[in-house]
Amino acid sequence: MDDKILHTLEYRKILDTLSQYTQTSMGKRMAEQLKPAVQLDDVKHLLAATDQAYTVDRLKGSPSFGGITDVNDALKRARIGGTLNPHELLSVANTIWGSRRIKRFIAQIHEDESVEILYNLSDLISEQKPLEDAIKACIDDSAEVMDSASSELMQIRRELRNGEVRIREKLDAMIRSQSVAKMLQDQLITIRGDRFVIPVKAEYRSYFGGIVHDQSGSGATLFIEPESIVAMNNKLRETRMKEEREIEVILQKLTALVGEQADLLTIDIDITGQLDFIFAKARLAHVMKASLPRMNDRGYLKLKKGRHPLIPMEQVVPIDVELGNSYTSIIVTGPNTGGKTVTLKTIGLLNLMAMSGMFIPAEEGSQMCVFDAIYADIGDEQSIEQSLSTFSSHMTNIIRILKNMTPKSLVLLDEVGAGTDPAEGSALAIAILEHIHRMECRMIATTHYSELKAYAYERKGVINASMEFDINTLSPTYRLLVGVPGRSNAFAIAERLGLPGVILDYARGEVKEEDQRVEHMIASLEENRHAAEIERGKAEVLRKEMEELRSRHTQELAKLEEQRDKLVDKARQDAKKIVDKARSEAEEIISDLRKLAQEEGASVKEHKLIAARKRLDEAEPEQKRKSAGQRSGTKAKRSIEPGDEVMVYSLNQKGHVVEMAGAKEALVQLGIMKMKVSLDDLELLSTPAASKSQSQRHVTTVKRTRDANIRKELDLRGANLEEALIEVDRFMDEAFLGNLGQVSIIHGKGTGILRTGIQDYLRKHKHVKSYRLGNYGEGGTGVTIAELK
């Protein structure tokens, strides 16, 4: 990409802004040297990395790159055998620590949110923990070699401290002496050139032996090392030299360790710089409120509310533009200072940012194209030094563009053909645009020439556009209107400013009729556009309202369904509780009846208890018992009488009326129980005739054989045991009342369950004297003969 074009589109200013968000010198250098990529896969990879960093920044914040510095120079010296000083070694240790912290931060994020590109990059960092520990064990945070760096150094420094203590004690005793104190300027001990001295008045120099190391600015004070401590200072000096030699040995050992890992550390520094650079792009995206663009390489460009990144957000006017689908060239017209140049720069700069892996300040859904190059001729490029006019300068740039462009290039031309005779300039402009259009380049050009409006209108694949101008305020709105050519506002502006009408009328008469028709057509288009925008705004409001209503209705429907499910579940639970309670009470009643039968010797038929329990078990908890005010059906056409089948609502059970118990109650048979029930708690279900027919319909599996008067045999083949016992009980009662001496019960052979159950029942029956299986000719084992008392 041509550096001059990057400068023209202000790409360098974006890089300067980006570099401000880096935290390391390596990241800053990468930001300053960033160039747009020209391969689609490369651009997608760069944007994906930025997107992942953007996600990390949004979820956990950006990682800190504190402590990481560019130690490449130190690593180079370590490779060739030089000795690193404590500050350099501490920087190496801190860089190792910071790199390891970054690696672990990204690894933790990757466990919850996939950031594969960042994870794979950070995973290449070598964790040089042993080297870091070795350096930190010898050098403290102030870049001083610690006593514990070696046992020799510890011993040497112990000697140093002891030697200093002895010297100070010697000098303290000296300066407190009255004979010496009067010769001192101040009673204190100081150091000059690593040697302990005392300040002596200059006039007492001859009375004071020793070595003079310094004097004050006025010359009144001499800093003298007394002769009595010269030997002690010499000894201390030798010890310090031993300390320096030991420190040198320690630093050489540490440097050797660094040199061994220099290659890996160089890679670590480069990786941390890349990560810093990627997170800087993510932070810039947050600040600019930018979004991830979709990329393609088919020459398609679509900006939705695109903003120039260098104009404050509260001042910039977003633009919408689409290029490369229905049309490949846009001709923009409009007044000066209307925003045409800013529009060109916005489109070019945002595309460069996207190709560099940066988010663009536009709405979601914007698309950018990976061009092999972006060419721009924008602004007044007049060069006095080269003696070139404005027109010559523009032509020089355009010729260079025409020479280098390809069908995969984007060409941006500002005021094409300007700076010369309008007739020749417009003709030249049309020829240049036609050539670029035939090359199938993507092109956006601005112009003042009205002839280019007609060219864009007539040429397929080329569309007019304009910068909106507000006649009422006599100022541009900086809005790009694609599909509407710009109109001349000279007459309207002059009229608003107060130019006499006579002059205006004369001027309008000088305009060609064809030009007037074009202006009227453009004015009509603008009116239609305004009307369409108003209608679109209303439609957008309605659409949002409908979406809100639909969302609200969906939520309410879901809430109602949830409430319905809860109510159904509660109703089922309540019904189950009612049935469970009724079953418990029935079991208690049956138990009481059994005890009562045992105590009083009464005979409560077991099969009746079984039948009652079966009816209870078959009760379905579908709905609650109806209250008196919710009884189904209409009132009975006649009053309840004995033999009627009724519903007892308080028990939710069906029964038969045995007899009336007064005017307000009836004795009702409920299975094996009889109880008095209020008439208000009863509902007539059927008359005795209906009950009889209904009973006959239900007992379809039991076949009865009866003569004209009393049955002498009972056919139970096909019935189950419970149904058979009920029929046997009823049959035995009829036979006993009919004074029959012997009856036959046909149960069939089958599995023998029915035969065994019936015979067990007959064994306990009070009316049965004896029973036996049928003889030959009576049915054999398929018949039981019972002899009654």
Image (cartoon, rainbow, N blue to C red):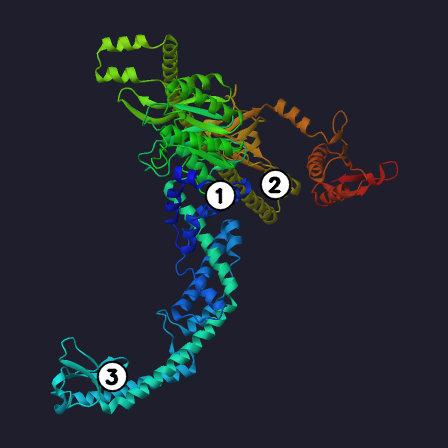
Identify the mark at residue 196; answer none if there is no mark.
3
Q: Give the mark nearer the N terminus: 3 vs 2.
A: 3
Q: Up-down: is 409 above or below 455?
A: below
Which percent across, then down, holds residue 233? 28, 87
Left or right: residue 455 compared with residue 599: left
Helix, strand or loop for disc 1: helix
Between label 3 and label 2, give the one nearer the viewer: 3
Q: Give the mark nearer the N terminus: 1 vs 3.
A: 1
What is the distance, in whole Å, between disc 1 and disc 2 at their CAs? 75 Å
Q: Nearer the viewer, residue 740 or 254?
A: 254
Helix, strand or loop for disc 3: strand
Identify the mark at residue 613; answer none if there is no mark.
2
Amino acid type, callout 2: Arg
Between label 1 and label 3, give the one nearer the viewer: 3
Residue 350 visible to an observer of this rendering: yes
Residue 9 visible to an observer of this rendering: no
Q: Residue at x 43, y 66 (%)?
A: 93
* Residue lying farthest to the right in this orientation: 776
Which percent across, then down, holds residue 159? 34, 86
Q: Up-down: is 144 above or below 94?
A: below
Q: Which residue is mark 1?
A: 47
Which percent across, then down, holds residue 587? 57, 45
Helix, strand or loop for disc 2: helix
Amino acid type, callout 1: Leu
